[in-house]
Image (cartoon, rainbow, N blue to C red):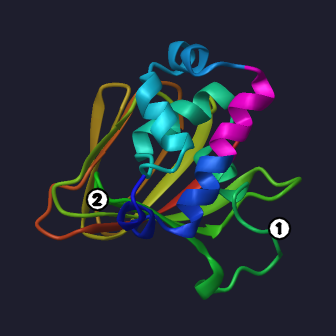
């Protein structure tokens, strides 16, 4: 990996790569075994674990499913010890540049708590599809603050405008789409079953 590419990756991406490699090692899986379990190619997994690329939201979702974690749990594992008050400037921000998705852990998961609060932003035209939830039966509340968001769950598309809130339990594939013309900003409340 060249130094120019290293400079592009944020410190959280470097810690995330190390955590992904650590999780695979803890399970005793080869890259091939993880590829079979996740449906992600060995080369993509290898690049993500070596911090040669920042993983996409869809990739992290597949790995979270295999490891039985929410995306917030995984991301919180690469951050410092959780505290009661999370100051705005200290909230972990993760960006999937390829899909136009920015995720801020407003109140990240903590031991003994089942809920978390996330701010999501999708650029106009962004379209993210997830094969399934990281944890089956995950409860989600999506409150749109600005823009328009189309969420597909169980083959039903919900068209949400500013102020609208969608409540759902996620069992299968979902899709988040920002039709534009402006970006969409929303609050996501995630509650583990």
Q: Is residue 150 above or below residue 62?
A: below
Numbered circle sitting on residue 81: 1
Say whether disc 2 or disc 1 marks the residue closer to the N-terminus.
Answer: 1
**Distance from the alpha carbon under mark 2 to that under mark 1:** 28 Å
Q: Is residue 6 above or below residue 177?
A: below
Instruction: Tell me the magenta residue range.
Output: 19-28
**Residue 17 shown in magenta:** no
- Is residue 106 found left or right of 130 in the rendered image? right
- Image coords of residue 35 (percent x, y): 51, 19
**Mark 1 crowdedness (10 Å alpha carbons): few <14, some 14-19, many ≥20:** few
Choose between 172 and 35: the one closer to the eye.
Answer: 35
User: Residue at point 59% right, 29% down?
Assistant: 65
**Residue 20 shown in magenta:** yes
- Image coords of residue 97 (percent x, y): 32, 59
User: Residue at point 89% right, 53% down?
Assistant: 112
Q: Tell me the element at label 1.
A: loop
- Image coords of residue 43 (percent x, y): 42, 28
**Mark 2 crowdedness (10 Å alpha carbons): few <14, some 14-19, many ≥20:** some
Choose between 188 and 161: the one closer to the eye.
Answer: 188
Q: Tell me the element at label 2.
A: loop
Report which quarter residue 8 is drawn in. Answer: bottom left
Regarding residue 191, the answer to whether it shows in the image is no
Q: Is residue 61 above or below residue 92?
A: above
- Image coords of residue 79 (percent x, y): 71, 65
Dominant secondary structure of the residues highlighted in magenta in the image: helix
User: Residue at point 50% right, 68% down?
Assistant: 10
The residue at which mark 2 appears reads as 100
Choose between 11 and 184: the one closer to the eye.
Answer: 11
């Amino acid at each position: 990996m060249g130094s120019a590419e290293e400079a592009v990756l944020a410190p959280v991406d470097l810690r995330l790569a190390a955590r992904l490699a650590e999780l695979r090692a803890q399970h005793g899986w080869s890259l091939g075994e993880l590829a079979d379990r996740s449906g992600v190619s060995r080369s993509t997994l290898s690049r993500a674990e070596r911090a040669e690329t920042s993983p996409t939201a869809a990739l992290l979702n597949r790995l979270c499913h295999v490891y039985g974690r929410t995306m917030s749990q995984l991301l919180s594992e690469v951050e410092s010890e959780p505290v009661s008050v999370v100051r705005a400037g200290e909230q972990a921000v993760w960006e999937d540049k390829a899909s136009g998705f920015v995720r801020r852990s407003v109140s990240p998961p903590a031991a003994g708590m089942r809920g978390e609060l996330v701010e999501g932003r999708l650029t106009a035209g962004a379209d993210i599809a997830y094969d399934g939830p990281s944890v089956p039966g995950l409860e989600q509340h999506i409150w749109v603050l600005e823009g328009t968001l189309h969420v597909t769950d169980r083959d039903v598309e919900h068209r949400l405008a500013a102020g609208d809130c969608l409540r759902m339990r996620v069992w299968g594939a979902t899709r988040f789409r920002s039709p534009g013309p402006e970006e969409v900003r929303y609050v996501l409340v995630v509650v583990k079953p």
